[in-house]
Amino acid sequence: GETLKSTAQIDVNGGLLGLTGGVLPLAGRVDLATGTTLRFETGNTDDPSGRIRLDNGAAVTLAVASDVQFATSLTVDGVGGGAVTKSGAGKLTLTVANTAITGGFTVAQGTMDVTHAQALGAAAATVTGGLLTVNATIANTVNVSNGGTLGGGGILGTANVALGGTLAPGNSPGMLTVGSLALAGGSFYEWQVQNATNHSTGYDKLTVTGNLDLTGATSGSRITIRIASLLGAGDGNT
Protein backbone atom coordinates (compact mmCIF):
# COMPACT_ATOMS: atom_id res chain seq x y z
CA GLY A 1 0.00 0.00 0.00
CA GLU A 2 0.87 3.67 0.05
CA THR A 3 3.12 5.16 2.75
CA LEU A 4 2.08 8.46 4.28
CA LYS A 5 4.77 11.08 4.78
CA SER A 6 3.35 13.78 6.99
CA THR A 7 4.73 17.24 7.70
CA ALA A 8 1.63 18.06 9.74
CA GLN A 9 0.50 17.25 13.25
CA ILE A 10 -0.94 13.76 13.66
CA ASP A 11 -3.31 13.34 16.60
CA VAL A 12 -3.56 9.75 17.83
CA ASN A 13 -6.68 9.68 20.00
CA GLY A 14 -7.09 5.93 20.18
CA GLY A 15 -5.51 2.69 19.05
CA LEU A 16 -2.13 2.41 17.35
CA LEU A 17 -0.03 4.34 14.85
CA GLY A 18 2.79 2.48 13.10
CA LEU A 19 5.81 4.29 11.69
CA THR A 20 8.18 2.91 9.08
CA GLY A 21 11.53 4.59 8.49
CA GLY A 22 11.40 8.11 7.06
CA VAL A 23 7.64 8.64 7.27
CA LEU A 24 7.84 11.46 9.81
CA PRO A 25 9.96 14.31 8.36
CA LEU A 26 11.45 17.01 10.56
CA ALA A 27 8.36 19.20 10.25
CA GLY A 28 5.97 16.45 11.34
CA ARG A 29 4.70 15.75 14.85
CA VAL A 30 2.71 13.03 16.62
CA ASP A 31 0.46 13.82 19.59
CA LEU A 32 -0.50 10.80 21.72
CA ALA A 33 -3.61 10.52 23.87
CA THR A 34 -3.77 8.24 26.89
CA GLY A 35 -4.02 4.54 26.06
CA THR A 36 -2.49 4.89 22.59
CA THR A 37 0.54 3.17 21.09
CA LEU A 38 3.21 4.53 18.77
CA ARG A 39 4.86 1.56 17.06
CA PHE A 40 8.25 1.69 15.35
CA GLU A 41 8.00 -0.96 12.65
CA THR A 42 10.80 -3.46 12.04
CA GLY A 43 13.82 -1.73 10.51
CA ASN A 44 12.78 1.76 11.61
CA THR A 45 15.67 3.26 13.57
CA ASP A 46 14.60 6.90 13.13
CA ASP A 47 14.71 9.26 16.11
CA PRO A 48 11.46 11.27 16.21
CA SER A 49 11.75 11.98 19.94
CA GLY A 50 11.62 15.76 19.45
CA ARG A 51 8.38 15.36 17.52
CA ILE A 52 6.52 13.14 20.01
CA ARG A 53 4.18 14.94 22.40
CA LEU A 54 1.95 13.37 25.02
CA ASP A 55 -1.43 14.80 25.90
CA ASN A 56 -1.70 16.23 29.40
CA GLY A 57 -1.53 13.31 31.85
CA ALA A 58 -1.43 10.68 29.10
CA ALA A 59 -0.12 7.16 29.66
CA VAL A 60 1.16 5.85 26.32
CA THR A 61 3.12 2.93 24.88
CA LEU A 62 6.17 3.11 22.62
CA ALA A 63 6.55 -0.22 20.78
CA VAL A 64 10.06 -0.59 19.36
CA ALA A 65 10.95 -3.48 17.04
CA SER A 66 14.54 -2.46 16.16
CA ASP A 67 17.18 -0.36 17.94
CA VAL A 68 16.13 3.28 18.40
CA GLN A 69 17.94 6.11 20.21
CA PHE A 70 16.11 9.15 21.58
CA ALA A 71 18.39 12.20 21.56
CA THR A 72 15.69 14.80 22.31
CA SER A 73 13.43 15.06 25.37
CA LEU A 74 9.84 13.87 25.16
CA THR A 75 7.30 16.64 25.77
CA VAL A 76 3.86 16.85 27.33
CA ASP A 77 1.03 19.23 26.42
CA GLY A 78 0.30 20.72 29.83
CA VAL A 79 1.57 20.41 33.37
CA GLY A 80 -0.05 17.08 34.26
CA GLY A 81 2.93 15.07 33.10
CA GLY A 82 2.75 11.71 31.38
CA ALA A 83 3.80 8.07 31.62
CA VAL A 84 5.53 5.86 29.07
CA THR A 85 5.59 2.07 28.67
CA LYS A 86 8.25 0.56 26.42
CA SER A 87 7.17 -2.59 24.58
CA GLY A 88 8.47 -4.52 21.57
CA ALA A 89 11.57 -6.69 21.21
CA GLY A 90 13.89 -3.85 20.17
CA LYS A 91 16.17 -1.61 22.21
CA LEU A 92 15.26 1.97 23.13
CA THR A 93 18.14 4.13 24.37
CA LEU A 94 17.36 7.32 26.30
CA THR A 95 20.27 9.76 26.05
CA VAL A 96 18.66 12.98 27.35
CA ALA A 97 16.55 14.22 30.26
CA ASN A 98 12.81 13.45 30.23
CA THR A 99 11.65 15.57 33.14
CA ALA A 100 8.18 16.04 31.63
CA ILE A 101 7.44 12.34 32.12
CA THR A 102 6.38 12.64 35.75
CA GLY A 103 4.33 9.45 35.73
CA GLY A 104 7.38 7.27 35.21
CA PHE A 105 8.67 4.77 32.69
CA THR A 106 7.76 1.09 32.52
CA VAL A 107 9.73 -1.56 30.62
CA ALA A 108 7.40 -4.34 29.50
CA GLN A 109 9.40 -5.95 26.68
CA GLY A 110 12.78 -5.76 24.99
CA THR A 111 15.50 -3.47 26.33
CA MET A 112 15.56 0.12 27.52
CA ASP A 113 19.02 1.61 28.05
CA VAL A 114 19.45 4.72 30.21
CA THR A 115 22.54 6.84 29.51
CA HIS A 116 21.51 10.20 31.04
CA ALA A 117 21.05 11.12 34.71
CA GLN A 118 17.48 12.35 34.16
CA ALA A 119 16.44 10.09 31.30
CA LEU A 120 13.76 8.49 33.49
CA GLY A 121 12.54 11.79 34.90
CA ALA A 122 12.14 11.89 38.68
CA ALA A 123 9.53 9.18 39.20
CA ALA A 124 10.14 5.53 39.99
CA ALA A 125 10.69 3.21 37.03
CA THR A 126 9.12 -0.24 36.77
CA VAL A 127 10.35 -3.33 34.95
CA THR A 128 7.56 -5.83 34.33
CA GLY A 129 9.32 -7.68 31.50
CA GLY A 130 12.42 -7.35 29.37
CA LEU A 131 15.55 -5.54 30.54
CA LEU A 132 16.32 -2.10 31.92
CA THR A 133 20.03 -1.24 31.75
CA VAL A 134 21.21 1.72 33.80
CA ASN A 135 24.43 3.13 32.34
CA ALA A 136 24.35 6.55 33.99
CA THR A 137 24.13 7.91 37.53
CA ILE A 138 20.44 8.24 38.35
CA ALA A 139 18.55 9.01 41.56
CA ASN A 140 15.45 7.00 40.63
CA THR A 141 13.94 4.03 42.37
CA VAL A 142 13.64 0.99 40.10
CA ASN A 143 11.05 -1.67 40.92
CA VAL A 144 11.57 -5.02 39.20
CA SER A 145 8.61 -7.39 39.14
CA ASN A 146 8.11 -10.95 37.96
CA GLY A 147 9.72 -11.43 34.53
CA GLY A 148 11.72 -8.20 34.56
CA THR A 149 15.50 -7.73 34.71
CA LEU A 150 17.65 -4.82 35.91
CA GLY A 151 21.23 -4.53 34.69
CA GLY A 152 23.84 -2.08 33.47
CA GLY A 153 27.06 -0.55 34.71
CA GLY A 154 25.78 2.68 36.23
CA ILE A 155 24.64 3.97 39.61
CA LEU A 156 21.06 4.17 40.86
CA GLY A 157 19.36 5.26 44.05
CA THR A 158 17.16 2.33 45.04
CA ALA A 159 16.29 -1.06 43.54
CA ASN A 160 13.53 -3.38 44.70
CA VAL A 161 13.49 -6.83 43.09
CA ALA A 162 10.29 -8.79 43.69
CA LEU A 163 9.55 -12.50 43.37
CA GLY A 164 10.39 -13.61 39.83
CA GLY A 165 12.46 -10.50 39.12
CA THR A 166 16.16 -10.59 38.22
CA LEU A 167 19.12 -8.41 39.15
CA ALA A 168 21.88 -8.82 36.56
CA PRO A 169 24.61 -6.23 37.20
CA GLY A 170 26.97 -5.16 34.45
CA ASN A 171 27.02 -5.25 30.68
CA SER A 172 28.52 -8.72 30.24
CA PRO A 173 30.42 -8.27 32.51
CA GLY A 174 30.52 -5.06 34.55
CA MET A 175 29.61 -3.41 37.83
CA LEU A 176 26.32 -1.94 39.00
CA THR A 177 26.13 0.34 42.04
CA VAL A 178 22.94 0.69 44.08
CA GLY A 179 22.31 2.98 47.03
CA SER A 180 19.67 0.74 48.64
CA LEU A 181 18.75 -2.76 47.48
CA ALA A 182 15.96 -5.15 48.46
CA LEU A 183 15.87 -8.69 47.06
CA ALA A 184 12.65 -10.54 47.80
CA GLY A 185 12.27 -14.26 48.25
CA GLY A 186 11.94 -15.93 44.87
CA SER A 187 14.05 -13.29 43.10
CA PHE A 188 17.14 -14.02 41.03
CA TYR A 189 20.70 -12.69 40.99
CA GLU A 190 22.52 -13.35 37.71
CA TRP A 191 26.32 -13.40 37.93
CA GLN A 192 28.23 -13.51 34.65
CA VAL A 193 31.83 -14.70 34.66
CA GLN A 194 34.34 -14.50 31.85
CA ASN A 195 37.60 -14.83 33.79
CA ALA A 196 37.32 -15.62 37.50
CA THR A 197 40.98 -14.68 38.08
CA ASN A 198 40.58 -11.14 36.71
CA HIS A 199 39.05 -9.17 39.55
CA SER A 200 38.95 -5.95 37.48
CA THR A 201 36.89 -6.90 34.42
CA GLY A 202 36.53 -10.66 34.53
CA TYR A 203 33.12 -10.93 36.15
CA ASP A 204 30.04 -9.02 37.23
CA LYS A 205 30.17 -7.01 40.44
CA LEU A 206 27.52 -5.39 42.58
CA THR A 207 28.17 -2.56 45.03
CA VAL A 208 25.54 -1.56 47.59
CA THR A 209 26.45 1.69 49.30
CA GLY A 210 23.51 1.75 51.73
CA ASN A 211 20.99 -0.79 52.99
CA LEU A 212 20.81 -4.37 51.70
CA ASP A 213 17.45 -5.91 52.59
CA LEU A 214 17.16 -9.69 52.30
CA THR A 215 14.45 -10.11 54.92
CA GLY A 216 11.92 -11.16 52.31
CA ALA A 217 13.79 -14.41 51.68
CA THR A 218 12.95 -17.54 53.66
CA SER A 219 13.93 -21.20 53.54
CA GLY A 220 10.87 -21.81 51.41
CA SER A 221 11.34 -18.77 49.16
CA ARG A 222 15.01 -18.29 48.49
CA ILE A 223 17.07 -15.90 46.40
CA THR A 224 18.55 -17.88 43.53
CA ILE A 225 22.02 -17.08 42.19
CA ARG A 226 22.45 -17.93 38.54
CA ILE A 227 26.05 -18.25 37.31
CA ALA A 228 26.55 -17.68 33.58
CA SER A 229 29.88 -18.41 31.91
CA LEU A 230 30.96 -15.96 29.20
CA LEU A 231 33.36 -17.59 26.76
CA GLY A 232 35.33 -16.07 23.91
CA ALA A 233 34.88 -12.32 23.59
CA GLY A 234 32.86 -12.06 26.79
CA ASP A 235 29.84 -10.65 24.99
CA GLY A 236 27.42 -13.27 26.28
CA ASN A 237 27.04 -14.76 22.80
CA THR A 238 30.18 -16.84 22.28
Image (cartoon, rainbow, N blue to C red):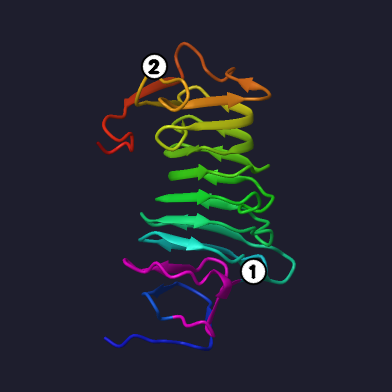
Please tell me which of labels 1 and 2 falls first in the chain.
Answer: 1
Report the number of numbered marks: 2
Q: Quadrant of the N terminus?
A: bottom left
Nearest the viewer among 136 and 119 is 136
Q: Position of residue 217 (x, y in %)?
A: 52, 17
- Dot 2: few (<14), some (14–19), or many (≥20) neighbours within 10 Å? few
User: What residue is drawn where x is 47% and y is 83%?
Assistant: 25
- Per the rendering, the mark at residue 216 is none
Q: Is residue 109 visible from the viewing direction of this image?
A: no
Q: What is the three-letter code of the residue carrying label 1?
A: Thr
Q: Is residue 44 visible from the viewing direction of this image?
A: yes
Q: Position of residue 177 (x, y in %)?
A: 59, 31
Q: Quadrant for residue 171, please give it.
A: top left
Q: Look at mark 2 in the image and give the residue it sits on.
A: 197
Q: Which residues are magenta?
A: 24-53
Q: What is the three-letter code of the residue carrying label 2?
A: Thr
Q: Look at mark 1 in the image and give the residue it sits on.
A: 75
Residue 178 is left or right of residue 202, and the answer is right
